[in-house]
């Protein structure tokens, strides 16, 4: 793409769009990385979450079991789960309780 952009007199946006990029800035970003940067910068960057999700099957099972056995609300469940070392928020506990239909509104 850079070779084509440098050797022909086409507008840079047309050259970028020919290779699947949307903007003229993409052309110049790639050109700059190729001429002055590290070739690793040309590889696509990973998108999406950068860490593992906190909501696991084990945590869901523990929340559901505690809800049934002890009848605790979401704040009490959060306090109970943070003691053994789980990094949970009351919002996460509320989502799990709601997803499994254990809310008082649904009872």
Image (cartoon, rainbow, N blue to C red):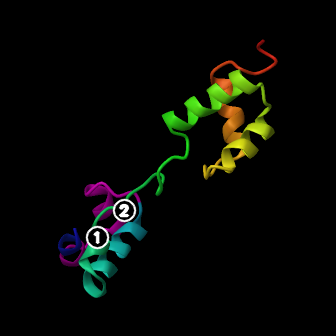
Q: In which quarter of the image is residue 79?
A: top right
Q: In this view, does 44 lie above or below 42?
A: above
Q: Magenta residues?
A: 5-22
Element type at marker 2?
A: loop
Whether residue 60 is in magenta: the answer is no
Q: Position of residue 58 (x, y in %)?
A: 51, 36
Instruction: Check the image and report above or below for 7 versus 13.
Output: below
Q: In which quarter of the image is residue 29?
A: bottom left
Residue 45: image tag = 2
Q: How many other residues sit within 10 Å of disc 1, few (<14), some (14-19) or many (≥20)?
A: few
On screen, residue 68 above or below 83: above
Identity of the residue drawn at 26% across and 56% down: 18
Q: In this view, does 67 lie to the left or right of 56?
A: right
Residue 80, located in which quarter of the rendered image? top right
User: Mark 1 sits on what residue?
Assistant: 42
Q: In which quarter of the image is the C terminus?
A: top right
Q: Is residue 40 above or below residue 76?
A: below
Give percent across and percent down for residue 48: 46, 51
Q: Is residue 79 left or right of residue 25?
A: right
């Amino acid at each position: 793409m850079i070779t084509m952009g440098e050797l022909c007199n086409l507008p840079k946006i047309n050259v970028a769009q020919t290779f699947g990029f949307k903007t003229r800035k993409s052309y110049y970003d790639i050109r700059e990385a190729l001429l002055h940067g590290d070739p690793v910068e040309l590889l696509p960057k990973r998108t999406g979450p950068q860490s593992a999700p906190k909501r696991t099957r084990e945590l869901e099972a523990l929340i559901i079991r505690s809800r049934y056995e002890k009848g605790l609300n979401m704040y009490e469940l959060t306090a109970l789960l943070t003691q053994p070392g789980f990094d949970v928020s009351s919002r996460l506990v509320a989502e799990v309780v709601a997803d499994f239909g254990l809310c008082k509104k649904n009872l």
